[in-house]
């Protein structure tokens, strides 16, 4: 259990480290070229970014782009998923989805330029780094509201990052309680997508934090 908690804090540290790294090289009103430059610096071997909508870029090999497409289609099967996607689409900012082979313990993170735009209703462009190769289920868990742990599926993980992206692209990001904000959205998604699972994710960060499941054993 102690190893699991330590692993969770390590994941939190790495997410913060990558966020600060992105802040250092992200520029005001990033163009596609600037956003792609950020991606290429972090993932040197990545050279395949496709613009699939006026606001959306998907980066990765063909099979990785197929996975992203499937994740998006699954999100859109729920009302909250549709609302989240439309909010990002209509924000006037870019969303870039990037397969990140290094994201194992956290699986995903959403990074953006650090500015007042994140909280003043304007918003800024967002890059979601996500490991599309993680299993659909059984790779990550989070603290539950009923049982100690509840599954954190690949789909839920992806939606969680979309929630961060929604708030950051629309300037409604809660800078102090960012995780709690995304977890609230995630729990709505959980209810709509898997209503049979009543064990939702705890809003208490120490309890509800994400843990890479191998660290539990």
Image (spheres, helix red, strand yellow):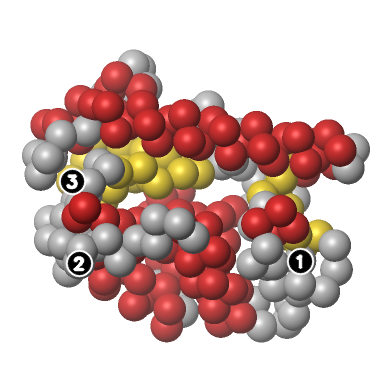
Residue 55 in percent (x, y) is at: 17, 55
The C terminus, quarter of image: top right
User: CA–CA distance between discs 2 and 3?
Assistant: 25 Å
Of 23 and 141, nearer the camera is: 23
Is there any visible trace of residue 146 in the rendered image? yes
Is residue 64 positioned above or below 73 on the image?
above
Q: Are marks 3 and 1 in contact (CB under 8 Å)?
A: no
Residue lying at 69% horizontally and 40% vertically, measured from the top left: 8
Residue 164 is left or right of residue 154, and the answer is: left
- Where on the picture, by quarter, is residue 107? top right
- Where on the picture, by quarter, is residue 60? top left
Q: Mark 3 points at which residue?
A: 51
Q: Which of marks 1 and 2 is nearer the N terminus?
A: 2
Residue 24 in percent (x, y) is at: 27, 27
Is there any visible trace of residue 133 in the rendered image? no
Residue 88 in percent (x, y) is at: 26, 64
User: CA–CA distance between discs 3 and 1?
Assistant: 37 Å
**Total number of numbered discs in the rendering:** 3
- Residue furthest to the top in view is 44
The N terminus, quarter of image: top right
Residue lying at 78% horizontally and 41% vertically, measured from the top left: 5
Q: Do the residues labelled 1 and 2 touch (CB within 8 Å)?
A: no
Q: Mark 2 points at which residue?
A: 121
Front tag of 3 and 1: 1
The circle on residue 144 is: 1
* Element carrying mark 3: strand
Q: Which of marks 2 and 3 is nearer the N terminus?
A: 3
Label 2 Cα crowd, 10 Å radius (few <14 / some 14-19 / many 20+): some
The circle on residue 74 is: none
Residue lying at 85% horizontally and 62% vertically, measured from the top left: 148
């Amino acid at each position: 259990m102690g190893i699991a908690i330590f692993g969770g804090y390590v994941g939190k540290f790495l997410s913060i480290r990558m966020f600060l790294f992105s802040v250092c090289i992200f520029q005001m009103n990033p163009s596609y070229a600037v956003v792609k430059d950020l991606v290429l610096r972090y993932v040197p071997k990545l050279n395949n970014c496709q613009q699939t909508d006026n606001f959306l870029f998907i980066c990765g090999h063909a099979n990785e782009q197929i996975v992203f497409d499937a994740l998006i289609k699954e999100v859109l099967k729920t009302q909250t998923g549709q609302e989240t996607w439309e909010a990002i689409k209509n924000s006037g900012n870019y969303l870039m989805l990037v397969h990140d082979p290094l994201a194992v313990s956290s699986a995903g993170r959403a990074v953006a330029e650090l500015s007042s735009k994140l909280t003043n209703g304007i918003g800024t462009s967002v890059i979601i780094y996500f490991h599309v190769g993680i299993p659909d289920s059984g790779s990550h868990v989070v603290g539950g509201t009923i049982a100690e742990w509840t599954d954190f599926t690949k789909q839920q993980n992806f939606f969680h990052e979309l929630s961060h992206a929604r708030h950051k692209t629309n300037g409604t990001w809660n800078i102090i309680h960012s995780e709690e904000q995304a977890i609230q959205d995630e729990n709505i998604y959980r209810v709509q997508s898997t209503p049979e699972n009543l064990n939702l994710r705890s809003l208490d960060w120490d309890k509800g934090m994400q843990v890479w499941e191998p660290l539990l054993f």
